[in-house]
Image (cartoon, rainbow, N blue to C red):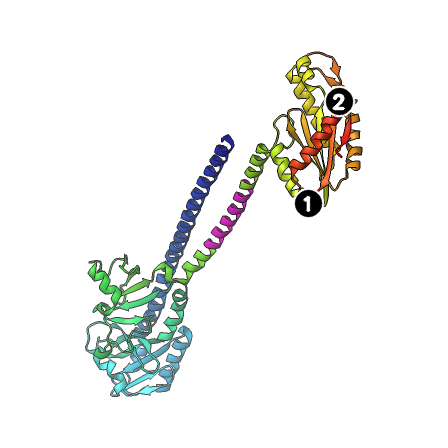
Amino acid sequence: MKLGNKFDRYIAVIFFVTIVTVILTSYFTLKDVINSHNKQVQSAVTPLFSLVTSEILRPLNVANFMAKNQFIIDYAEQAEIEKGYLVSYLEKIAKSYNMVAFIALEKHDVMLNSTGKETSLDGENVEWFHRLKNLPGEQFTDIGNAEAPHLYFDNKIHNMDGDFIGFTGVALELSYFARKFQEYNDRFGFELYFVDSNNIITLSSNKMIKSQSHHRTDLITRLSDLPWYQSLIKNNAADNNLTSEVMYTTDEGLLISQMPIQELNWRMFIVSPPASEQSAYWKIFIGRFMLFFIIVIVFYMALLTIINYLKSRLIKHAETDHLTQLPNRSHVHWRFDEIVKNNENLCLVLADIDNFKNINDTYGHLVGDDVLRIISEQLSQTLRKIDVVGRWGGEEFVMVLPDTSAEQALIIVERIRKNIAAISFPISTTSGSFTTTISFGICELPIKSKAIEDYIKGADKALYQAKHNGRNQSVIFN
């Protein structure tokens, strides 16, 4: 019962440690995944803001520079202009900044761009000129060129008297922005939406948004048309303040970041999908999961090792004689069954210390214990590794000798008997010593259909004969 309770305690402790370890490892692994992902998202949003700002403001500044170029203003005021000269100027701008540059002059009824294309201001494709001319403000953004949509940055040109004389500016292909934003879309699934002061989508990384010409009412996409924005309104989270940067989380788990672009009176929204839909999250998750899996495997192997160690310790404790450290009767039974399976014949020997009761009575039980220990060492040191020697009870020992005949066993035990008879056993209470002897009973039987009890019975009869013959003898059972 004590052994069972001890083993139960070991298992209970191991089970508790296992559960705690798995829970803690799972918690810290998941926490690490979430923290690592959030850090990546945060680290990505900041450079994305910078990227967008530079990509929007760079063409805006170039357009503003062109509109204030006094030489161009004076040249446009002339009665006649050399169109080739203006195209050459536009080509230099386009090459320097990798943009399409254009100029539209009302006095000369012409629009020129850096590709050499010339268009009359009365054409259908130049309706923007007259529309923007009548609007207040000096700078405009517009999307045009249905065949290859471009984002145009238009600046009004005024002469020295402040009179309007035309437009100049630059244009970028929408695909240019798409390439710039693709990396963030691939990694985090970000979608970008640029909204003007009227809450109309002027530019988007989402190809489903019809923004080819936002001034055409049938193609307008408003901010309120987007489901995620409707979710913000539903939660009273929408913020129309262009001077602040805010972040929201929708019911669907979308993370919405807003940044004002004051130069254009725009707002930029970054819509980040739930972590589970982002490739960056899964890369982190898989990496951490593999690490977690390896830790679990290592822990599992360590756990098995510990359990096997405890099991072997408990088995050894349960099947080992405490005094002599030899296997006890239970272990001998188990080993006998194993030997029978793998051998064709064996020999079993019973050994009994002669007159052991007199030793206890004369010198005390402590000296008797010393005798048992010394004889146990002699038995175990003399036998082969495949042999089994154990304490059968009291002063009696048993030896199981696989693949050994009775005659061979007799040779072995005779050598042991003579060695023991020659030992001077010390008396722990005095400086004296004494000698004792041991008797052996040997039994060899056909293994087939024989149990250990059959061998014990035969060996015991032989041992009884050895005692009857005067002790200190080895007898084979016949």
| Residue placed under numbered mark 1 in the picture | 448
Magenta range: 288-306
Q: Which residue appears at 67% of the width and 37% of the height?
A: 454
Residue 43 visible? The answer is: yes
Q: Which residue appears at 30% of the width and 59% of the height?
A: 253
* Quadrant of res 87: bottom left
Residue 265 visible? The answer is: no
Q: Is residue 1 above or below residue 447?
A: above
Residue type at mark 2 is Thr
Main SS of the magenta part reads helix
Left or right relative to 251: residue 284:
right
* Quadrant of res 437: top right
Provide residue 290's location: percent of width, then percent of height: 49, 54
Residue type at mark 1 is Lys
Q: Secondary structure at mark 2?
A: loop
| Residue placed under numbered mark 2 in the picture | 437
Pointer 2 or 1: first along the chain: 2
Report the number of discs.
2
Camera-nearest residue between 315 and 304: 315
Residue 18 part of the magenta-drawn span: no
Camera-nearest residue between 15 and 422: 422
Q: Which residue appears at 80% of the width and 26% of the height?
A: 418
